[in-house]
Image: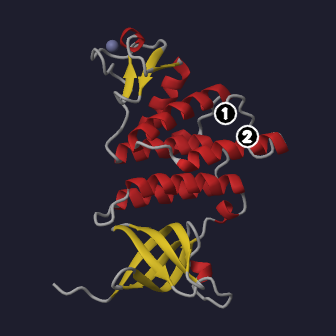
């Protein structure tokens, strides 16, 4: 079957890389898959595409199939998430989200669900105030999408219901272990009752309920460590943006006190 040379799609720019004199190679997530595309002349001051094809911009695209890379022939931005580009911390959250999505996206096999998830995430990271909370919600939705939803209700060791006490989280097993099974699992980490409740809440409630949640600093730090440890295990490598985000937050905290984000002693 012959493929049409031109096609239209909506997409979000996940990554960009300068190429040649004035071009850029873009990694774009679309509802039908991830594509690599060449944006010719986009770095020239006169480029009409430039404003419509920045990092994380959602745009309507007219694409031409190329021998190696498809070529962006027209772009019209639909949503620019301005908040992300005015605040380095928000921008870094978006980078981390895009990196996670990039790890899970497939070239051939599209997913409207993954696209929707990234879109919701970028909207949150460009406007919401508790970025960490929305990142945890995003991570859990992403884990569910990828088939790694953590088990938070039943012990993965003995199969008994998790009771309201200090239990354990095992990245290897993919969820909670009861106190007895957890003690015998060397890589499992203890989880406070509060962190257990928050994880369950984030996994089972909708965005509206999540928006009303207020966490203490220590619970924030604990839930973040659990989910990022699990994601790194699942993705089998350190997520680079997560490490950068931790460094950036420490630097901002040292420089500007609590202006950008609340103080967080153990990150
Ligand atoms: Zn058990």
Q: Is mark 1 within 8 Å of ligand 1?
A: no
Q: Which secondary structure lies at badge 1?
A: loop
Rendering quadrant holding ligand 1: top left
> Compared to 197, does 164 lie above or below?
above
Q: Is residue 11 visible?
A: yes
Mark 1 or 2, nearer chain start = 2
Front residue (pair 52, 66): 66
Q: Which mark is residue 267?
A: 1
Q: Residue at x 51, y 57 (%)?
A: 98
Residue 152 numbered mark, or none: none
Q: Position of residue 241 (x, y in %)?
A: 57, 50
Q: How many marks?
A: 2
Q: Is residue 65 above or below residue 89?
A: below
Q: Which mark is residue 250?
A: 2
Query: Among all residues in the image, which is located at the extreme right?
Result: 256
Mark 1 in CB contact with mark 2 (< 8 angstroms)? yes
> Residue shown at 38%/8% (left/top)?
180
Q: Quadrant of the C terminus?
A: top right
Question: Would residue 127 be seen by someone viewing this image from the given angle?
Answer: no
Q: Residues within 10 Å of mark 2 (few under 14, many from 20)?
A: some
Residue at 33% from the left image edge and 85% from the top image edge: 67
Which residue ends up furthest to the top in the rendered image? 180
């Amino acid at each position: 079957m012959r493929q049409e040379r031109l096609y239209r799609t909506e997409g979000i720019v996940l990554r960009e890389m300068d190429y040649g004199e004035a071009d850029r190679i873009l990694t774009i997530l679309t509802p039908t898959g991830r594509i690599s595309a060449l944006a010719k002349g986009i770095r020239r001051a006169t480029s009409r595409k430039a404003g419509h094809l920045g990092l994380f911009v959602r745009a309507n695209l007219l694409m031409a199939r190329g021998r190696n890379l498809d070529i962006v022939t027209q772009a019209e931005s639909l949503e620019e998430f301005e908040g992300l580009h005015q605040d380095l911390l928000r921008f870094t959250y978006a980078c981390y989200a895009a990196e996670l999505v990039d790890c899970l996206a497939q070239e051939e096999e599209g997913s409207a669900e993954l696209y929707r998830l990234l879109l919701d995430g970028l909207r949150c990271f460009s406007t919401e105030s508790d970025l960490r909370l929305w990142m945890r919600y995003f991570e859990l939705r992403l884990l569910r999408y990828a088939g790694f939803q953590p088990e938070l209700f039943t012990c993965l060791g003995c199969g008994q219901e998790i009771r309201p006490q200090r239990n354990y989280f095992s990245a290897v097993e993919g969820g909670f272990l009861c106190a007895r099974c957890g003690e015998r699992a060397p890589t499992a980490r203890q989880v406070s009752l509060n962190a257990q409740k928050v994880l369950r809440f984030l996994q089972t409630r909708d965005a509206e309920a999540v928006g009303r949640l207020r966490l203490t600093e220590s619970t924030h730090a604990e839930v973040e460590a659990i989910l990022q440890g699990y994601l790194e295990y699942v993705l089998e490598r350190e997520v680079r943006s997560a490490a950068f985000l931790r460094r950036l937050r420490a630097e901002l905290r040292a420089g500007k006190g609590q202006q950008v984000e609340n103080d967080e002693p153990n990150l």
